[in-house]
Image (tube, helix red, strand yellow):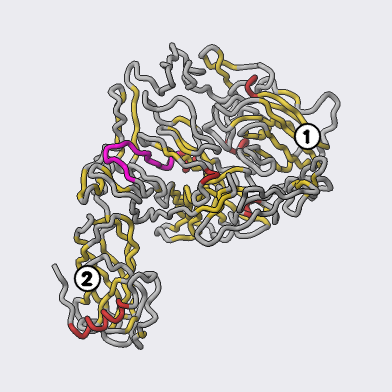
Amino acid sequence: MATTVPRALLIGLLTAVAGCTGADPGVSSASQSTSVGAALTVVSVSAGSRVLPGGALSVTVTARNTGNTTWSNRTVALVLLGEPSWRNSTLTLARSTRPNQTGTFSGTLTAPSQVGRYALAWQPMDGASSFGELVRANVEVTCSDGVFCNGAERFANGRCVAGNPPCDDGVACTTDTCDEANGVCDHTLGADCAPCAARNCNPNCHGNVCGDDGCGGSCGTCAAGLTCIEGACVASVAPGTCANPLQLLGPGEALLGLHTVTGDTSLGINGTVPQCNTSSTAKDLVYTFTVPGPDPVGLDARMTGFDSVLSLRMAGCADTDPATVMQPNWCSDDASPPGNYGSRIATMLNPGTYYLIADGYNAQQTGPFTITANFVAGCIPQCDGKFCGDDGCGGQCGACGAGTVCGPTFRCVTTPCSPDCRGRQCGSDGCGGSCGSCTKGNLCVEADGACRAFQACDHARPVCRTACSSQQFCGTDCQCHRVRDPLPDMIVDRTRLQSEVVITTATFGPASCAIVEACVGGPGTRRLMRFTVASVNQGQADLVAPPADQRPDLFDFSACHGHYHFNDFASYALLDAAGRVVVPGRKQAYCMEDSRQVRFGPNVSCEARYTCEAQGILAGWSDVYGNDLDCQWLDITDVPPGTYQLSVSVNPGRTFEEASFDNNTTTIPITIP
């Protein structure tokens, strides 16, 4: 139903809106004047969070007149800024409102046919003059009814059509469960139902409780301190286990100084679980050493060879008590140096016996490795982000080989170095310099050094590059998808998030990766809330990213970590009890890969497929970012003690189309002591 607007007000509104079409909703038009003496404070905004394409949206705003003039319902209204596709968008005042009284503005808007998210903002107007604060409401134009378990309805061929039930895996031998409240799917295996699928293979455990299922999958894992032998979990006393650890030092070798050991975890067992990656089922080898005392000793230990996890324990090697194993900086899943998925521990050790455990990120990460351990009396080498140069303890963070020197960024560079830009317009010249920069609107493709333009996709209001067929809808990735095709569905593992929050302090130097990547408020000692995020793909299709080195619009190369990160895969924020932002949300770049199988059934792959080199997450698998990783935290240095909420979102920008976006955010209560 159309809203009747008085002529005097209409003239003023037309003048104001003419200068606002297409403008930033947060900025009033420069052509507007400001009403002297008029002021407004929003009390409440009532508007639906979603509306059908072309549907009606009722909006009611209660506001207090905090000025010194009376609002006339003939001249005062709320005018929608910058959204001409919304019709009947002006909110009219119900009755004239005196100072210090509350007034009600209302209207029924007609939504556009373009699906997507809209941040609506209304400017209070008195005739042609603006006043007061903007009134805001976030609304999504969508066919979805907000019910998770019946599947997301899609806008296809100009109408809303039913989608797929998100938890139906299409397998007769599983019982599918849909948790409407949390937007979570689960699948219970029936009799003779394979827990996963391998190519040309039928998994069979034959009563085994652990070990390989014959197809690259697992029949189960053993508790800490036990190992799998012929399908049974038994205590092991093999060399390299907690019961029989290898010696880190040679006979009679002094502790202080640099030590190098090599080994092969494929010869070990899965005898321990690293405290910073509790989902790892990789084989490991255990080393032991003793700090004789009486004085403490600093340690810088590094492990290279594959995507490794290096952890340190004392007293009980197989201990799982958090008070023993969750010491700050005693576990590392990815560090720089050494980079390239290597790990590093830097800490101060009091006298006692310790266990240094060489492990892997997941079961596929195993093989030959090298550990270097540098022990320094009373000093922790400060080498975060430094591959060479002074370690602050009278030594060096690393040695540069023949023909190389330590450069200004604390990395070894060739000298003399001859830049090589043959056939390259941009990107690295091989000597720390650049082959050139791209003109505005183009990005550098590092793979071949070419400048290319990438068509932008508005993930909030997607428009497909080609017209979709009558059986397709335009996804948030600006690609056409068949309505009935399976899709990925990303959620955050709430249990893992709640159980792996740790509050610690850490000291960062100017060369630290956390400083380079702006993950803390500045150098020095910072207080951090660390947490583990397991991003679960519970959908029926893989989440697949394009080649990283060919899509600079989606990926950034992390010089600190030596691999590509997908931009804005997750976002974190600390909220107060009322949901207000305390620590602003920070977008987190990820290396997306398969960490662990977390859903089971004949349609779920037994074997990991995606890695940091070819990124994605298999259906039924999760990508785990442990709480020891750089930037896997919020900087709470300036946050007072109290009760808060930690909010974690995956795929917050909707870069990837999913079965549902309503379950992408998880919020848990947090107490900061």
Query: As drawn, is 416 to the left or to the right of 434?
Result: right
Q: Is residue 64 above or below residue 141?
A: below
Q: Residue type at mark 2?
A: Ser
Query: Helix, strand, or loop for circle 2?
Result: strand
- The residue that appears at 45% across and 60% down in the rendered structure is 581
Query: As drawn, is 573 to the left or to the right of 254?
Result: left
Q: Is residue 484 magenta?
A: yes
Q: Nearer the viewer, mark 2 or mark 1?
A: 2
Dot 2 and dot 1 residues touching (CB under 8 Å): no
- Image quadrant of residue 148? top left
Q: Is residue 176 magenta?
A: no
Q: Position of residue 265 (x, y in %)?
A: 64, 24
* One can see residue 391 in this view: no
Q: Residue tagged by mark 1?
A: 291
Identify the image quadrant of the N terminus: bottom left
- The residue that appears at 71% across and 37% down in the rendered structure is 302
Q: Which residues are magenta?
A: 480-495
